[in-house]
Amino acid sequence: MAINTPLGDTLDGFRDALLAGRSAITHWKAFDASRIYSKVGGDLTDYDPAPKLASFSGRTPELVLRRLHRLLARVPWSTKLSMLLAVDAGTDAAVGAFDPQRVAVLIAGHNLNSRYQFDSQPQFVEEPDYIDPLFTLHGLDTDHGASISEVLGLRGPLYTVGAACATGNAALRCALDEIRHHGMEAALVTGAILDFSPMDLHGMALMGAISFQGFNEAPAQASRPYDVRREGFVPAHGGAAVVLENLASARSRGVPIYAELVGVESTSDACHLPQPSEDGQALAMSRLLEVCGVAPEAITYVNAHATSTPLGDLTELRSIKRVFGRHAGQVKLNATKSMLGHTCWAAPLVETVATVLQMQAGRLHPSINIDELDPEVDLDVCAGRAVDHTFEYALKNSFGFGGINSVSLLRRL
Protein backbone atom coordinates (compact mmCIF):
# COMPACT_ATOMS: atom_id res chain seq x y z
CA MET A 1 0.00 0.00 0.00
CA ALA A 2 0.99 3.65 -0.40
CA ILE A 3 -0.67 6.89 0.70
CA ASN A 4 -0.33 10.62 0.07
CA THR A 5 -2.57 13.11 1.84
CA PRO A 6 -2.01 16.38 3.70
CA LEU A 7 -1.82 14.21 6.84
CA GLY A 8 1.19 12.30 5.59
CA ASP A 9 2.75 10.28 2.77
CA THR A 10 3.90 7.28 4.82
CA LEU A 11 1.69 4.56 6.25
CA ASP A 12 2.92 5.05 9.81
CA GLY A 13 2.68 8.83 9.68
CA PHE A 14 -0.79 8.70 8.16
CA ARG A 15 -2.01 6.23 10.80
CA ASP A 16 -0.62 8.26 13.67
CA ALA A 17 -2.18 11.49 12.39
CA LEU A 18 -5.57 9.81 12.04
CA LEU A 19 -5.47 8.32 15.53
CA ALA A 20 -4.46 11.72 16.92
CA GLY A 21 -7.52 13.33 15.31
CA ARG A 22 -5.63 15.93 13.27
CA SER A 23 -7.42 17.96 10.61
CA ALA A 24 -5.88 18.29 7.15
CA ILE A 25 -8.11 21.16 6.07
CA THR A 26 -6.59 24.60 5.40
CA HIS A 27 -7.16 27.50 3.01
CA TRP A 28 -6.53 26.69 -0.65
CA LYS A 29 -3.06 27.50 -1.93
CA ALA A 30 -3.36 25.80 -5.32
CA PHE A 31 -5.17 28.73 -6.90
CA ASP A 32 -6.66 32.15 -6.21
CA ALA A 33 -9.90 31.48 -4.32
CA SER A 34 -10.92 35.13 -3.99
CA ARG A 35 -13.65 34.89 -6.65
CA ILE A 36 -15.17 31.60 -5.53
CA TYR A 37 -17.37 30.83 -2.54
CA SER A 38 -15.41 27.96 -1.04
CA LYS A 39 -12.03 28.95 0.37
CA VAL A 40 -11.00 25.77 2.20
CA GLY A 41 -9.85 22.26 1.37
CA GLY A 42 -7.18 19.65 1.84
CA ASP A 43 -4.31 21.17 -0.13
CA LEU A 44 -1.20 19.27 -1.23
CA THR A 45 0.17 21.87 -3.63
CA ASP A 46 3.26 22.50 -1.53
CA TYR A 47 4.09 18.80 -1.33
CA ASP A 48 7.84 18.20 -1.55
CA PRO A 49 8.60 14.85 -3.24
CA ALA A 50 12.30 14.87 -2.30
CA PRO A 51 11.98 12.85 0.95
CA LYS A 52 9.82 10.26 -0.80
CA LEU A 53 12.29 9.96 -3.65
CA ALA A 54 15.11 9.59 -1.14
CA SER A 55 13.20 6.79 0.59
CA PHE A 56 13.24 4.76 -2.65
CA SER A 57 17.04 4.65 -2.72
CA GLY A 58 18.32 1.15 -2.12
CA ARG A 59 14.79 -0.34 -2.23
CA THR A 60 13.61 0.44 -5.74
CA PRO A 61 15.39 -0.83 -8.86
CA GLU A 62 17.72 1.75 -10.38
CA LEU A 63 16.08 1.44 -13.80
CA VAL A 64 12.71 2.34 -12.26
CA LEU A 65 14.23 5.35 -10.49
CA ARG A 66 15.85 6.60 -13.71
CA ARG A 67 12.55 6.36 -15.56
CA LEU A 68 10.76 8.05 -12.66
CA HIS A 69 13.12 11.04 -12.52
CA ARG A 70 12.91 11.47 -16.29
CA LEU A 71 9.11 11.51 -16.38
CA LEU A 72 8.67 13.62 -13.25
CA ALA A 73 10.20 16.54 -15.13
CA ARG A 74 7.64 16.30 -17.94
CA VAL A 75 4.17 15.54 -16.64
CA PRO A 76 1.49 17.60 -14.84
CA TRP A 77 1.35 17.79 -11.05
CA SER A 78 -1.32 15.16 -10.43
CA THR A 79 0.36 12.67 -12.75
CA LYS A 80 3.64 13.14 -10.86
CA LEU A 81 1.92 12.20 -7.61
CA SER A 82 0.29 9.17 -9.25
CA MET A 83 3.70 7.89 -10.31
CA LEU A 84 5.14 8.42 -6.83
CA LEU A 85 2.22 6.52 -5.28
CA ALA A 86 2.54 3.67 -7.76
CA VAL A 87 6.29 3.33 -7.29
CA ASP A 88 5.85 3.45 -3.52
CA ALA A 89 3.24 0.67 -3.52
CA GLY A 90 5.10 -1.24 -6.22
CA THR A 91 8.28 -1.16 -4.16
CA ASP A 92 6.36 -2.32 -1.08
CA ALA A 93 4.98 -5.25 -3.07
CA ALA A 94 8.13 -5.98 -5.11
CA VAL A 95 6.13 -5.88 -8.36
CA GLY A 96 9.34 -6.35 -10.33
CA ALA A 97 9.22 -10.02 -9.37
CA PHE A 98 6.08 -10.57 -11.45
CA ASP A 99 5.85 -11.32 -15.15
CA PRO A 100 5.36 -7.72 -16.40
CA GLN A 101 2.82 -8.94 -18.95
CA ARG A 102 0.63 -10.27 -16.13
CA VAL A 103 0.29 -7.18 -13.95
CA ALA A 104 -2.75 -4.98 -14.59
CA VAL A 105 -2.48 -1.20 -14.12
CA LEU A 106 -5.71 0.52 -13.12
CA ILE A 107 -6.29 4.21 -12.50
CA ALA A 108 -9.18 5.06 -10.21
CA GLY A 109 -10.31 8.48 -11.36
CA HIS A 110 -11.57 10.67 -14.18
CA ASN A 111 -11.32 14.35 -15.19
CA LEU A 112 -8.16 14.28 -13.11
CA ASN A 113 -6.02 17.13 -14.46
CA SER A 114 -8.69 19.81 -14.31
CA ARG A 115 -6.47 22.58 -12.95
CA TYR A 116 -3.80 21.85 -15.59
CA GLN A 117 -6.43 22.29 -18.30
CA PHE A 118 -7.93 25.37 -16.62
CA ASP A 119 -4.52 27.04 -16.29
CA SER A 120 -3.70 26.30 -19.94
CA GLN A 121 -6.67 28.23 -21.30
CA PRO A 122 -5.32 31.79 -20.79
CA GLN A 123 -2.22 30.88 -22.79
CA PHE A 124 -4.41 29.51 -25.57
CA VAL A 125 -6.42 32.74 -25.63
CA GLU A 126 -3.24 34.84 -25.77
CA GLU A 127 -1.32 32.69 -28.26
CA PRO A 128 -2.49 29.14 -29.15
CA ASP A 129 0.93 28.02 -30.41
CA TYR A 130 2.47 28.45 -26.97
CA ILE A 131 0.37 25.97 -25.02
CA ASP A 132 2.08 22.82 -23.76
CA PRO A 133 2.80 20.84 -26.96
CA LEU A 134 1.78 17.69 -25.09
CA PHE A 135 -1.42 19.28 -23.80
CA THR A 136 -3.69 16.75 -25.52
CA LEU A 137 -1.71 13.82 -24.14
CA HIS A 138 -1.28 15.16 -20.62
CA GLY A 139 -4.93 16.10 -20.37
CA LEU A 140 -5.98 12.47 -20.75
CA ASP A 141 -6.70 10.42 -17.64
CA THR A 142 -4.98 7.47 -19.31
CA ASP A 143 -1.69 9.40 -19.16
CA HIS A 144 -1.57 8.59 -15.43
CA GLY A 145 -1.71 4.86 -16.12
CA ALA A 146 0.59 5.05 -19.13
CA SER A 147 3.21 6.93 -17.11
CA ILE A 148 2.99 4.37 -14.30
CA SER A 149 3.25 1.52 -16.79
CA GLU A 150 6.34 3.09 -18.37
CA VAL A 151 8.07 3.75 -15.05
CA LEU A 152 7.49 0.26 -13.67
CA GLY A 153 7.79 -1.54 -17.01
CA LEU A 154 4.37 -3.19 -16.62
CA ARG A 155 2.78 -4.54 -19.81
CA GLY A 156 -0.52 -6.04 -18.68
CA PRO A 157 -3.93 -4.45 -19.29
CA LEU A 158 -4.14 -0.73 -18.54
CA TYR A 159 -7.28 1.34 -18.14
CA THR A 160 -9.07 3.95 -16.07
CA VAL A 161 -12.20 3.43 -14.00
CA GLY A 162 -14.72 6.19 -13.38
CA ALA A 163 -17.58 6.03 -10.88
CA ALA A 164 -17.49 9.47 -9.23
CA CYS A 165 -16.88 9.16 -5.48
CA ALA A 166 -17.31 5.37 -5.66
CA THR A 167 -14.46 5.07 -8.16
CA GLY A 168 -11.84 3.56 -5.86
CA ASN A 169 -14.08 0.66 -4.89
CA ALA A 170 -15.16 0.15 -8.50
CA ALA A 171 -11.50 -0.08 -9.48
CA LEU A 172 -10.87 -2.68 -6.77
CA ARG A 173 -13.76 -4.69 -8.21
CA CYS A 174 -12.11 -4.58 -11.64
CA ALA A 175 -8.78 -5.58 -10.11
CA LEU A 176 -10.36 -8.65 -8.53
CA ASP A 177 -11.76 -9.61 -11.92
CA GLU A 178 -8.36 -9.22 -13.58
CA ILE A 179 -6.85 -11.72 -11.13
CA ARG A 180 -9.79 -14.12 -10.88
CA HIS A 181 -10.87 -14.23 -14.52
CA HIS A 182 -8.17 -12.79 -16.80
CA GLY A 183 -5.00 -14.56 -15.74
CA MET A 184 -3.26 -11.63 -14.06
CA GLU A 185 -0.76 -12.36 -11.29
CA ALA A 186 -1.37 -8.96 -9.70
CA ALA A 187 -3.12 -5.65 -10.14
CA LEU A 188 -1.77 -2.22 -9.22
CA VAL A 189 -4.62 0.18 -8.47
CA THR A 190 -3.79 3.87 -8.08
CA GLY A 191 -6.35 6.29 -6.71
CA ALA A 192 -5.13 9.43 -8.46
CA ILE A 193 -5.26 12.85 -6.83
CA LEU A 194 -7.99 15.01 -8.31
CA ASP A 195 -6.42 18.37 -9.19
CA PHE A 196 -9.40 20.67 -8.64
CA SER A 197 -9.74 23.89 -10.59
CA PRO A 198 -11.46 26.89 -9.00
CA MET A 199 -14.27 26.47 -11.51
CA ASP A 200 -14.87 22.90 -10.27
CA LEU A 201 -15.22 24.12 -6.71
CA HIS A 202 -17.44 27.04 -7.57
CA GLY A 203 -19.75 24.73 -9.48
CA MET A 204 -19.95 22.42 -6.46
CA ALA A 205 -20.77 25.40 -4.24
CA LEU A 206 -23.52 26.62 -6.58
CA MET A 207 -25.00 23.11 -6.47
CA GLY A 208 -24.96 23.22 -2.66
CA ALA A 209 -22.69 20.18 -2.36
CA ILE A 210 -19.69 21.63 -0.50
CA SER A 211 -19.06 23.66 2.63
CA PHE A 212 -18.68 27.42 2.08
CA GLN A 213 -21.08 29.33 4.32
CA GLY A 214 -19.96 28.86 7.90
CA PHE A 215 -16.33 27.77 8.04
CA ASN A 216 -14.25 29.70 5.50
CA GLU A 217 -12.50 31.38 8.42
CA ALA A 218 -12.15 28.15 10.42
CA PRO A 219 -10.93 25.56 7.89
CA ALA A 220 -10.09 22.82 10.39
CA GLN A 221 -13.72 22.78 11.53
CA ALA A 222 -15.32 22.67 8.09
CA SER A 223 -15.58 18.90 7.65
CA ARG A 224 -17.97 17.73 10.36
CA PRO A 225 -19.92 14.54 9.57
CA TYR A 226 -22.83 13.85 11.95
CA ASP A 227 -22.71 17.33 13.53
CA VAL A 228 -25.85 19.47 13.40
CA ARG A 229 -23.90 22.30 11.71
CA ARG A 230 -22.58 20.24 8.79
CA GLU A 231 -23.23 22.01 5.52
CA GLY A 232 -21.51 19.99 2.79
CA PHE A 233 -18.35 18.09 2.02
CA VAL A 234 -14.88 19.64 1.93
CA PRO A 235 -12.92 18.86 -1.27
CA ALA A 236 -9.37 17.66 -0.71
CA HIS A 237 -6.27 16.42 -2.44
CA GLY A 238 -5.29 12.88 -1.57
CA GLY A 239 -4.42 9.59 -3.21
CA ALA A 240 -3.50 5.99 -2.50
CA ALA A 241 -2.23 2.93 -4.31
CA VAL A 242 -2.62 -0.75 -3.53
CA VAL A 243 -1.29 -3.95 -5.05
CA LEU A 244 -3.56 -6.99 -5.10
CA GLU A 245 -2.43 -10.58 -5.59
CA ASN A 246 -3.66 -13.95 -4.42
CA LEU A 247 -2.74 -15.04 -0.91
CA ALA A 248 -0.58 -18.02 -1.85
CA SER A 249 1.54 -15.84 -4.12
CA ALA A 250 2.02 -13.14 -1.47
CA ARG A 251 3.01 -15.69 1.16
CA SER A 252 5.45 -17.44 -1.12
CA ARG A 253 7.16 -14.14 -1.98
CA GLY A 254 7.37 -12.94 1.62
CA VAL A 255 5.96 -9.48 0.91
CA PRO A 256 3.91 -7.47 3.44
CA ILE A 257 0.30 -8.71 3.60
CA TYR A 258 -1.94 -6.04 5.07
CA ALA A 259 -5.42 -7.53 4.69
CA GLU A 260 -7.66 -9.61 2.47
CA LEU A 261 -10.05 -7.95 0.02
CA VAL A 262 -12.93 -10.39 0.30
CA GLY A 263 -15.19 -8.78 -2.28
CA VAL A 264 -16.72 -5.63 -3.77
CA GLU A 265 -20.31 -5.09 -4.87
CA SER A 266 -21.96 -2.19 -6.69
CA THR A 267 -25.48 -0.96 -7.40
CA SER A 268 -27.03 2.08 -9.07
CA ASP A 269 -30.12 4.11 -8.24
CA ALA A 270 -31.39 4.82 -11.78
CA CYS A 271 -31.16 8.54 -11.01
CA HIS A 272 -28.53 10.96 -12.34
CA LEU A 273 -29.03 13.55 -9.60
CA PRO A 274 -26.85 13.62 -6.45
CA GLN A 275 -29.60 12.28 -4.21
CA PRO A 276 -28.44 9.42 -1.94
CA SER A 277 -30.71 6.40 -1.91
CA GLU A 278 -31.28 4.27 1.17
CA ASP A 279 -32.53 1.46 -1.08
CA GLY A 280 -29.44 1.46 -3.30
CA GLN A 281 -26.95 1.70 -0.45
CA ALA A 282 -28.63 -1.03 1.59
CA LEU A 283 -28.79 -3.29 -1.47
CA ALA A 284 -25.05 -2.89 -2.09
CA MET A 285 -24.18 -3.77 1.51
CA SER A 286 -26.58 -6.71 1.82
CA ARG A 287 -25.62 -8.12 -1.58
CA LEU A 288 -21.92 -7.95 -0.67
CA LEU A 289 -22.42 -9.85 2.58
CA GLU A 290 -24.51 -12.46 0.80
CA VAL A 291 -22.03 -12.97 -2.06
CA CYS A 292 -19.11 -13.22 0.37
CA GLY A 293 -20.97 -15.58 2.70
CA VAL A 294 -20.48 -13.34 5.73
CA ALA A 295 -23.26 -12.86 8.28
CA PRO A 296 -24.16 -9.28 9.26
CA GLU A 297 -23.32 -10.15 12.86
CA ALA A 298 -19.67 -10.70 11.85
CA ILE A 299 -19.29 -7.00 11.02
CA THR A 300 -18.41 -4.73 13.92
CA TYR A 301 -16.81 -1.82 12.03
CA VAL A 302 -17.84 0.28 9.04
CA ASN A 303 -15.60 2.94 7.55
CA ALA A 304 -18.41 5.26 6.58
CA HIS A 305 -18.77 7.33 3.43
CA ALA A 306 -19.84 10.15 5.79
CA THR A 307 -19.11 13.20 3.67
CA SER A 308 -20.57 15.86 6.00
CA THR A 309 -23.68 16.56 3.93
CA PRO A 310 -27.00 17.03 5.75
CA LEU A 311 -28.85 14.32 3.81
CA GLY A 312 -26.00 11.96 2.92
CA ASP A 313 -24.82 11.23 6.45
CA LEU A 314 -28.30 10.28 7.64
CA THR A 315 -29.16 8.26 4.55
CA GLU A 316 -26.09 6.10 5.09
CA LEU A 317 -26.97 5.53 8.75
CA ARG A 318 -30.51 4.51 7.82
CA SER A 319 -29.09 2.11 5.23
CA ILE A 320 -26.76 0.54 7.79
CA LYS A 321 -29.61 0.07 10.26
CA ARG A 322 -31.74 -1.53 7.57
CA VAL A 323 -29.00 -4.05 6.72
CA PHE A 324 -27.85 -4.84 10.26
CA GLY A 325 -31.10 -4.52 12.21
CA ARG A 326 -30.59 -4.82 15.96
CA HIS A 327 -26.92 -5.67 15.43
CA ALA A 328 -26.33 -2.10 14.17
CA GLY A 329 -26.04 -1.05 17.80
CA GLN A 330 -22.92 -3.23 18.08
CA VAL A 331 -21.28 -1.75 14.98
CA LYS A 332 -18.78 1.07 15.31
CA LEU A 333 -18.44 3.65 12.55
CA ASN A 334 -16.10 6.53 11.95
CA ALA A 335 -15.67 9.28 9.37
CA THR A 336 -12.18 9.53 7.90
CA LYS A 337 -13.37 12.54 5.89
CA SER A 338 -13.85 14.50 9.12
CA MET A 339 -10.06 14.90 9.13
CA LEU A 340 -9.08 14.51 5.47
CA GLY A 341 -12.00 16.12 3.73
CA HIS A 342 -13.31 14.38 0.61
CA THR A 343 -10.61 13.13 -1.75
CA CYS A 344 -13.38 12.33 -4.24
CA TRP A 345 -12.50 9.63 -6.78
CA ALA A 346 -9.57 8.41 -4.66
CA ALA A 347 -11.56 8.46 -1.39
CA PRO A 348 -12.45 4.74 -1.36
CA LEU A 349 -8.78 3.77 -1.73
CA VAL A 350 -7.50 6.42 0.69
CA GLU A 351 -10.06 5.23 3.24
CA THR A 352 -9.33 1.58 2.51
CA VAL A 353 -5.74 2.25 3.55
CA ALA A 354 -7.08 4.03 6.66
CA THR A 355 -9.31 1.04 7.42
CA VAL A 356 -6.49 -1.49 7.07
CA LEU A 357 -4.15 0.57 9.27
CA GLN A 358 -6.82 0.76 11.99
CA MET A 359 -7.44 -2.97 11.61
CA GLN A 360 -3.77 -3.67 12.24
CA ALA A 361 -3.57 -1.21 15.14
CA GLY A 362 -6.71 -2.52 16.88
CA ARG A 363 -7.74 1.10 17.33
CA LEU A 364 -10.27 3.34 15.56
CA HIS A 365 -9.61 6.98 14.83
CA PRO A 366 -12.08 9.62 16.06
CA SER A 367 -14.71 11.37 14.00
CA ILE A 368 -13.76 14.96 14.74
CA ASN A 369 -15.68 18.25 14.79
CA ILE A 370 -18.80 16.74 16.32
CA ASP A 371 -19.68 19.57 18.69
CA GLU A 372 -23.39 18.74 18.73
CA LEU A 373 -24.39 15.30 17.50
CA ASP A 374 -27.36 15.22 15.13
CA PRO A 375 -30.29 13.80 17.15
CA GLU A 376 -30.92 11.16 14.48
CA VAL A 377 -27.40 9.75 14.84
CA ASP A 378 -28.01 6.89 17.27
CA LEU A 379 -25.07 4.64 16.31
CA ASP A 380 -21.54 4.74 17.72
CA VAL A 381 -19.64 7.06 15.36
CA CYS A 382 -16.51 7.41 17.55
CA ALA A 383 -17.42 11.03 18.20
CA GLY A 384 -14.38 12.99 19.30
CA ARG A 385 -12.38 10.04 20.55
CA ALA A 386 -10.17 7.22 19.36
CA VAL A 387 -11.26 3.84 20.71
CA ASP A 388 -9.63 0.44 21.05
CA HIS A 389 -11.45 -2.04 18.86
CA THR A 390 -10.31 -5.40 17.49
CA PHE A 391 -12.26 -6.58 14.47
CA GLU A 392 -11.94 -9.27 11.82
CA TYR A 393 -14.12 -7.74 9.10
CA ALA A 394 -14.69 -4.17 7.93
CA LEU A 395 -17.06 -2.64 5.42
CA LYS A 396 -15.89 0.32 3.35
CA ASN A 397 -18.84 2.32 2.00
CA SER A 398 -18.48 4.60 -1.01
CA PHE A 399 -21.34 6.38 -2.75
CA GLY A 400 -20.97 8.62 -5.81
CA PHE A 401 -22.89 11.25 -7.74
CA GLY A 402 -25.15 9.66 -10.32
CA GLY A 403 -26.58 7.15 -7.87
CA ILE A 404 -23.49 4.92 -7.81
CA ASN A 405 -23.08 2.73 -4.72
CA SER A 406 -20.03 0.54 -4.13
CA VAL A 407 -19.07 -1.33 -0.97
CA SER A 408 -16.00 -3.43 -0.24
CA LEU A 409 -15.40 -6.05 2.46
CA LEU A 410 -11.97 -6.39 4.09
CA ARG A 411 -10.73 -9.10 6.43
CA ARG A 412 -7.83 -9.04 8.87
CA LEU A 413 -5.18 -11.71 8.26
Image (cartoon, rainbow, N blue to C red):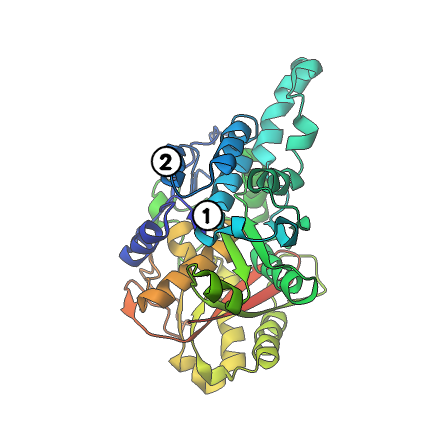
Whole-percent x, y for residue 385 in the image: 27, 64
- Marks 2 and 1 in Cβ contact (< 8 Å): no
Relative to 150, is 333 above or below?
Answer: below
Whole-percent x, y for residue 143 in the image: 64, 37
Whole-percent x, y for residue 49 in the image: 41, 34
User: What residue is rendered at 47% in x and 29% in y?
Assistant: 34
The residue that label 2 is drawn on is 54
- Quadrant where the N terminus is found in the figure: bottom left
User: What residue is rendered at 62% in x and 75% in y?
Assistant: 283
User: What residue is rendered at 62% in x and 43% in y?
Assistant: 145
Choose between 12 and 333: the one closer to the eye: 12
Horizontal side, residue 145 vs residue 310: left or right: right
Relative to 334, is 339 above or below?
Answer: above
Among the 4 quarters of the image, the one containing residue 332: bottom left
* Residue 344 seen in the figure: no
Q: Residue furthest right?
A: 270
User: What is the three-letter code of the residue carrying label 2?
Assistant: Ala
Among the 4 quarters of the image, the one containing residue 149: top right
Horizontal side, residue 249 vs residue 105: left or right: left
Q: Within 10 angstroms of label 1, few (less than 14), some, or many (20 or more) residues? A: some
Mark number for residue 230?
none
Mark number for residue 91?
1
User: What residue is rendered at 62% in x and 30% in y?
Assistant: 117
Q: How far apart are marks 2 and 1 (CA)?
A: 13 Å
Relative to 176, is 12 above or below?
Answer: above
Q: Within 10 angstroms of label 2, few (less than 14), some, or many (20 or more) residues? A: few
- Quadrant where the C terminus is found in the figure: bottom left
Whole-percent x, y for residue 122 in the image: 62, 20
Task: Tell me the SS state at disc 2.
Answer: helix
